Image (cartoon, grey):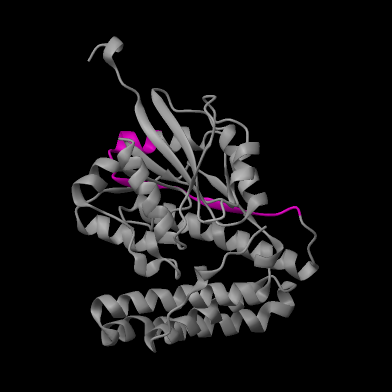
């Protein structure tokens, strides 16, 4: 194809919005500073998951995107993670885009994020790819305990990213989640892939999408250098939130496996893990005074995860995303 007839590749960057105006504003400022990949046309859309269009004012006040185009605003009135993500998929397919990118409204991409995300995705010919998320505190006032919790969250995120990079280097398939995510729309179109509405209030819709894509023969890629930063507000830097978040995550995981493979198979798989989580959690709890409480959030996270495993086996279903936290 000659240069005169070359058509740029088209990316739709979707930012789901969940009534967190300050976070969304910070996210869109970072999006406006993105460097665009060569020969790529970018469309940025905020998908407002609020029938009252609460994000509109923030979008109108936001800087234009990197190529000078205004950031768009669309309302998805049906509440839930899957409703808004599927709306973004439908919009990207209708726009005949080549790829759909997701970025959460509580994150800020680094200026080279989209360049590295697209480069790794395009050259690897992956059908789904994603990269790491680092943690930083919001600028709000914090207690000393909240600062310890944030430090624990940041260390946990770093360990998780290191493990995923290690797994990817050995040919494994680390989870690709929607806070830093790109999918090839030709694969989505060919297989009719959508997010499963059953995960709309619980979370885990992205992990489920990932598993089904792999089952259809899709190729995934972990892109270590395509990084974004997540802002953690004070209300997420509380011990109770750490326990509840890990509890809900554990319950979701075991509940999903129980639905797919039966409760007995899930019990055999997760009961030893629950025991291990309790053991590590209790050890971390015991040594927390000697570590200036740095291990206390980790202890509660392990205890919450173990309790969640058992709750999921007993039929508990989390609705962690029935409400959102942020500012």
Closer to us: 239 or 102: 102
Q: Is residue 130 visible?
A: yes
Q: Locate residue 34, reporting x and y percent.
A: 54, 32
Asked whether 125 falls inside the magenta stretch, the response is yes
Q: Locate residue 21, reporting x and y percent.
A: 64, 51
Looking at the image, residue 36 lies above or below residue 175:
above
Residue 38 horizontal side relative to residue 5, left or right: right
Q: Residue at x 57, y 55 (%)?
A: 52
Closer to us: 216 or 198: 198
Residue 177 image-quadrant placement:
bottom left
Q: Residue at x 44, y 60 (%)?
A: 78
Residue 35 horizontal side relative to residue 91, left or right: right
Closer to us: 113 or 16: 16
Q: Which image quadrant: the C terminus?
A: bottom right
Residue 126 image-quadrant placement:
top left
Residue 125 image-quadrant placement:
top left
- Kindly give the residue lying farthest to the front in the view shown: 52
Q: Which image quadrant: the N terminus?
A: top left
Q: Is residue 296 visible?
A: no
Closer to us: 83 or 170: 83
Looking at the image, residue 96 lies above or below residue 290:
above
Q: From which residue to which does the magenta span run?
A: 119-139
Q: Residue at x 71, y 63 (%)?
A: 234
């Amino acid at each position: 194809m000659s240069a005169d007839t070359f058509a740029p590749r088209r990316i739709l960057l979707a930012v789901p919005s969940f009534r967190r105006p300050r976070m969304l504003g910070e996210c869109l400022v970072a999006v406006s500073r993105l460097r665009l990949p060569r020969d790529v046309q970018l469309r940025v859309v905020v998908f407002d998951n609020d029938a009252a269009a609460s994000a509109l004012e923030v979008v109108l006040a936001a800087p234009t995107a990197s190529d000078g185009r205004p950031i768009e605003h669309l309302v998805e009135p049906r509440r839930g993670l899957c409703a808004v993500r599927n709306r973004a998929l439908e919009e990207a397919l209708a726009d005949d885009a080549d790829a759909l990118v997701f970025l959460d409204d509580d994150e800020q991409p680094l200026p080279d994020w989209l360049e590295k995300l697209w480069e790794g995705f395009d050259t690897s010919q992956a059908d789904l790819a994603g990269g790491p998320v680092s943690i930083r505190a919001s600028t709000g006032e914090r207690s000393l305990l909240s600062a310890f919790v944030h430090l624990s969250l940041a260390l946990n995120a770093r360990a998780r990213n290191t493990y995923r990079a290690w797994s990817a280097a050995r040919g494994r398939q680390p989870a690709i989640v929607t806070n830093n995510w790109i999918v090839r729309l030709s694969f989505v179109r060919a297989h009719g892939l959508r997010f499963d509405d059953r995960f709309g209030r619980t979370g885990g819709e992205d992990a489920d999408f990932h598993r089904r894509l792999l089952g259809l023969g899709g190729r995934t890629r972990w892109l270590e250098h395509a990084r974004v930063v997540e802002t953690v507000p004070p209300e997420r830097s509380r011990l109770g939130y750490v326990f509840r978040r890990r509890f809900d995550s554990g319950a979701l995981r075991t509940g999903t496996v129980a639905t797919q493979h039966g409760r007995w198979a899930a019990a055999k798989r997760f009961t030893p893990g629950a025991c291990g989580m309790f053991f590590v959690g209790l050890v971390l709890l015991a040594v927390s005074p000697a570590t200036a409480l740095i291990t206390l959030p980790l202890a509660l996270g392990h205890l919450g995860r173990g309790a969640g495993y058992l709750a999921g086996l007993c039929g508990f279903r989390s609705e962690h995303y029935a409400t959102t936290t942020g500012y």
